[in-house]
Amino acid sequence: MTSTHYDVIVIGTSQGGRFLPIEFARAGRKVALIERDHMGGVCVNVGCTPTKTMVASARLAYQARRGAEYGVHTGPISVDLQAVRQRKQGMVEGARLNYESRLTELQGLGLDLLLGEAHFLAPKTLEVSLQDGGTREITAPLIVIDTGARPEPLTIKGAERVPVLNSTTIIELDTLPEHLFILGGGYIGLEFGQMFRRFGSQVTIIQSRPRLLMNEDEDVSKEVAKILREEGITVLTGAMPQQVESLGEGRMQLTVHTPQGEQQLIGSHLLAATGRVPNTEALTPEAAGIHLDQAGYIQVNERLETNVSGIYALGDVKGGPAFTHVSYDDYRILRTNLLEHGSASTRDRLVPHTIFIDPQLGRVGLTENEARKQGRTIRVAKLPMNAVPRALETGEMRGFMKAIVDAETQHILGCAILGVEGGEIMTIIQVAMMGNLPYTALRDGIFTHPTLAEGLNSLFMTLDS
Ligand SMILES: Cc1cc2nc3c(=O)[nH]c(=O)nc-3n(C[C@H](O)[C@H](O)[C@H](O)COP(=O)(O)OP(=O)(O)OC[C@H]3O[C@@H](n4cnc5c(N)ncnc54)[C@H](O)[C@@H]3O)c2cc1C
Ligand SMILES: NC(=O)c1ccc[n+]([C@@H]2O[C@H](COP(=O)([O-])OP(=O)(O)OC[C@H]3O[C@@H](n4cnc5c(N)ncnc54)[C@H](O)[C@@H]3O)[C@@H](O)[C@H]2O)c1
């Protein structure tokens, strides 16, 4: 087979795959971009965009049910899941089309879009199995891998004999589950758990580890569990699902080992939310001699270089924190180094995250546990949200703000904001951390009354006593 030669090949059309090819093409390079599924990758099609759109519907259902608390009376609240799904689909298609039209403009200007699956044949050679049949062989001295990850398949006994949902398929449901089992108490389990509870399902979250969100501090996990339980979700922790069995007529029985003994639960739907696995099997990186870790993630250094010269990886496929903003920052690093002759790296970057439960959990920097493990001398500021006037006035008092401060330098080391708009408040603290401000700058800053930000005065004033 004859090969077509390019200057650059990018595999996957997510954050890196979305912007890098465009910039290379604009810089006059001949670029091939390969995608085997929907344009835009996970975030736009089956991740952030659809889930946050659906979380908004769920929040509205929750708020509507609380109307009487505010003196506003509505009729009975019901959720039309088909309409929720249509709204979600509109959002996804809008985002996807926007990107596709930008790419179309560049085709013919040095960018070839190949719809199909890429497999390495040799270090600088790929074969693409095209969606409309046939294969193409292509080569380039520079190859960027942005192939992401996918839901980890469920392996418990009986899983192959019942319908198992994952984060991609659950967003296509047209009818509401009567009783949804969720295996996994991480990001996906919690966001979907609260969402479906608010839509009207009975929900049971089964988390194998001793608490939800194991990477967060104990007080944060505990408060999150309390909030979910208040909404009527059953949260089982330290609970290992053993086997699932169909009972017919859309019902299934799940056997779970819990600290209190074995439990048999009856439900209608099962969502596996136990983590994700990298998309490296079909890619056959071993044919290029690219090193993977034991879990199959591509190993890179802080400049996102693999062990094979000229081959880079970014986003989820390289392991580490799996967020869109990380993938986007990876793209910035590659753009700087490959197009602007800079020397950007992942070293010391501050990576925040927000879990879009309600109230949100916004987190950045060190947790209290991490700071203590590092042997730092710290002070911990903590304030319940019901001490923030804005939260009281809007009737959204659940959760707390917590910040970890270096006792010697007064610099903020990290924070967890579990409260209304927790992601936005966390970002204010993140900016203070980026500017190396001491905590006193937020304690004494003039913030508009009554905003949530004003709560930061009170949060850091707790360190005065
Ligand atoms: C339900 C859900 C909700 C999420 N919510 C958030 C959120 O709120 N905030 C946040 O920051 N992150 C969120 N994430 C995580 C975020 O979506 C990912 O971190 C992000 O999409 C990773 O981007 P990426 O660059 O690794 O590539 P991906 O988005 O994973 O895209 C990889 C692309 O490569 C293609 N591909 C794979 N293999 C091949 C091959 N061999 N040949 C050709 N093409 C290939 C795939 O089809 C895919 O389009 C969420 C994820 C999920 C699942
Ligand atoms: N808001 C966001 O930024 C957001 C939202 C959704 C997903 N994501 C990304 O997607 C990734 C994957 O999310 P996830 O929730 O699938 O993974 P996760 O790693 O966050 O959580 C998985 C959970 O499942 C538990 N678990 C593992 N095996 C189990 C089993 N057999 N039974 C019961 N529990 C089990 C683990 O202890 C863990 O708590 C996240 O790490 C995150 O990076 C981000």
Image (cartoon, rainbow, N blue to C red):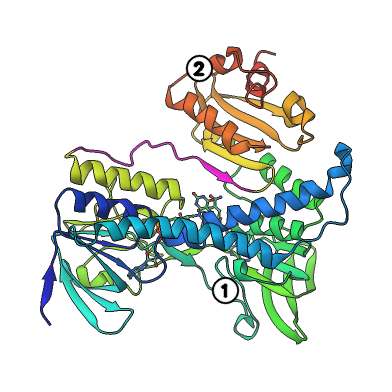
Q: Nearer the viewer, residue 420 or 110?
A: 110
Tell me the kind of residue under disc 2: Pro
Which amino acid, mark 1? Leu
Q: Is residue 397 left or right of residue 11?
A: right
Q: Looking at the picture, does residue 11 appear above or below residue 371?
A: below
Task: Identify residue for label 1.
Answer: 154
Q: Which mark is residue 438?
A: 2
In the picture provided, is 101 more to the left or to the right than 428?
Answer: left
Quadrant in which residue 424 is drawn: top right
Q: Residue 156: image x %, image y %?
A: 61, 76
Tell me, yes or no, if residue 235 can be seen here. Answer: no
Report if residue 351 lies within the magenta region. Answer: yes
SS for callout 2: loop
Q: Which mark is residue 310?
A: none
- Based on the picture, tell me whether residue 39 belongs to the magenta stretch: no
The residue lying toward the viewer, choosing from 412 and 358, is 358
* Start-end of magenta stretch: 342-356
Say if 454 sits above or below 207 in the image.
above
Give the quadrant of ligand 1.
bottom left
Q: How many marks?
A: 2
Q: Is residue 142 visible?
A: yes
Left/right placement of residue 317 relative to residue 224 reads: left
Tell whether circle 1 marks a residue whose Cβ is less than 8 angstroms from ligand 2.
Answer: yes
Please say if the residues under marks 2 and 1 sit with CB atoms less than 8 Å apart: no
Give the spatial CA distance, label 2 vs label 1.
46 Å
